Amino acid sequence: MVRRITLSLSILFCSTQLSFADENFAGEDLTNKEFGIIGGSITYGESVFSTKSAPQFGATPNLFYSGPKGFIDGSLANWQLLPYVGLSGSWRFAEVSDTFVDLPNGIQDRDGNGELGITLGTVGARLTYLHDVTSEHNGYEVQLHLGRTLETWTQPFTITPYLEIDYRDKKLSNHLYGISNTESSASGLNQFDAGSTFVYQAGLIGLYEFTPTWIGIARADLIHHDSDSALIQRDVGWSFELGVTYRFAGL
């Protein structure tokens, strides 16, 4: 099963790599250039795990960097060892936690964890394998990420549609979606042992260059977790965000 999934992702990755590679969010060639922004946004949306019936506001940090030696995209950092081959590290922030969403009563937080792995491709078209190295769940994930920056009717504004498909093995999936007997008794939800799962995410990222150093960001995201766990309160999670970033590289 895993080999069939890996083969399918690899074929899709290879068929799209040339058309997506070597560009950043600003549409610049990554071969010899740098581009980096850092900032924050106000977010409005609904998590698939939240019991709240109405969307909620939050704050989201923004960090992106790309250059000849690798890239940083949110919590994923990649150091390019060879052309199109890099060593990757990531901190998986807690997806299921009362700190970020309102969980059903009796459900415990799922802690975040550190991961290491390898990335094939570029920031715009990449296949990444990540394995838990902090003994939180000892599972792994395979991420296929495709993004392409497009010019618009006005030069300071660019838009980047993206698609990401994540395969999560049984250990990681059970860490996130599993419901123990104790939790079932406390929450009233059915006990659940998760198998391997997929997560599908898509969105649009818009950047507007107010000045060479100050760049506005607008973003819309949709996410679907392919699991039958009762922890998932709705089929699709969504969010909108608006913020300002400072360009620290590529000036």
Image: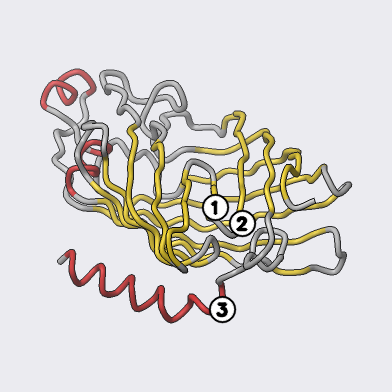
Query: Between marks 3 and 2, how big is the CA–CA gap?
Result: 18 Å
Residue that label 2 marks: 67
| Looking at the image, residue 220 lies above or below residue 147 | above
Dot 3 crowding, Cα within 10 Å, few <14, some 14–19, many 20+:
some
Image point (66%, 41%), residue name: 241
Secondary structure type for disc 2: strand
Q: Quadrant of the N terminus?
A: bottom left
Helix, strand or loop status at disc 1: strand
Which quadrant would residue 173 be assigned to in this image? top left
Q: Is residue 152 left or right of residue 63?
A: right
Q: Residue at x 87, y 47 (%)?
A: 210
Q: Residues within 10 Å of mark 1 (few under 14, many from 20)?
A: many
Rate crowding at label 2 as few (under 14), some (14 to 19) or many (20 or more) other CA atoms within 10 Å.
Answer: many
Image x and y of residue 178, in percent = 20, 36
Horizontal side, residue 230 vs residue 55: left or right: left
Residue 39 vs 100, above or below: the answer is below
C-alpha separation, residue under disc 2 versus residue under disc 1: 6 Å
Question: Residue 81: image x %, image y %?
Answer: 43, 59
Q: Residue at label 3? A: 19
Residue 248 quadrant: top right
Q: Nearer the viewer, mark 1 or mark 3?
A: 1
Q: Residue at x 69, y 53 (%)?
A: 35
Q: Residue at x 61, y 47 (%)?
A: 64
Q: Which residue is mark 1?
A: 71
Image marks 2 and 1: residues in contact by CB distance under 8 Å? yes
| Amino acid at circle 2 | Gly
